Image: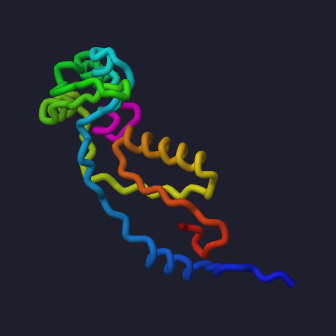
């Protein structure tokens, strides 16, 4: 007879154990909401691309980058740039003027998402080192582009809760 390894929890017991192990969800402040990194070397084009990313971060909606009410902000992105610089990695770092951009978004009838964002927990299956590193980089980049703090946890096969 083959014996199963590990502990298996069901129903209310698993919920209770999960609640004890996983800390309560909380908001995490995003320190760099007004700084965006975009690929390229053309500073004028980089400002507009950075503004598209910035609008998604600040409003909390992916549609903000193509929202007609915010189109003027993208067209005039340079007027909201406080500083920009080319990096050694072939990207451009753009720092936006927080008060001016916040006022412009509000004037366009859109709301700004609070800087204290919900922490996003992502559980990924156990994989090879190379695949795991690429997956974690992609998840972190997507979370950063949307202005979300992220915590990535790797599942371990055979453990009680599947977490490492």
Q: Residue at x 87, y 84 (%)?
A: 1
Is any part of residue 91 visible from this angle?
yes
Q: Residue at x 75, y 80 (%)?
A: 4
Range of residues picked out in magenta: 55-64
Q: Residue at x 50, y 75 (%)?
A: 18
Task: Return the x and y of residue 136 as percentages of the image width and height.
Answer: 50, 48
Which of 4/105 is in front?
4
Which of 119/43 is in front?
43
Q: Is residue 62 magenta?
A: yes
Task: Return the x and y of residue 29 as percentages of the image width and height.
Answer: 25, 53
- Asked whether, in this view, residue 85 is left or right of residue 136, the answer is left
Quarter holding the C terminus is: bottom right
Image vertical order of residue 94 relative to residue 156, above or below = above
Q: Residue at x 48, y 44 (%)?
A: 137
Is any part of residue 52 visible from this angle?
no
- Asked whether, in this view, residue 146 is left or right of residue 100, the answer is right
Which of 101/135 is in front?
135
Q: Is residue 30 magenta?
A: no
Image vertical order of residue 107 relative to residue 136, above or below = above
């Amino acid at each position: 007879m083959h014996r199963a390894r590990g502990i298996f929890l069901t129903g209310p017991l698993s919920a209770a154990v999960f609640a004890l192990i996983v800390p309560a969800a909380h908001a995490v402040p995003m320190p760099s909401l007004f700084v965006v990194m975009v690929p390229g070397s053309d500073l004028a084009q980089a400002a507009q691309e950075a503004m598209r990313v910035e609008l998604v971060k600040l409003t909390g909606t992916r549609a903000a980058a193509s929202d007609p009410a915010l189109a003027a902000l993208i067209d005039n992105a340079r007027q909201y740039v406080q500083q920009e610089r080319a990096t050694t990695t072939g990207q451009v770092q753009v720092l936006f003027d927080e008060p001016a951009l916040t006022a412009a978004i509000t004037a366009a009838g859109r709301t700004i998402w609070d800087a204290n964002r919900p922490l996003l927990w992502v559980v990924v299956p156990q994989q090879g080192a190379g695949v795991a590193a690429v997956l974690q980089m992609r998840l972190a980049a997507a979370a950063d582009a949307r202005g979300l703090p992220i915590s990535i946890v790797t599942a371990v096969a055979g453990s009680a809760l599947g977490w490492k």
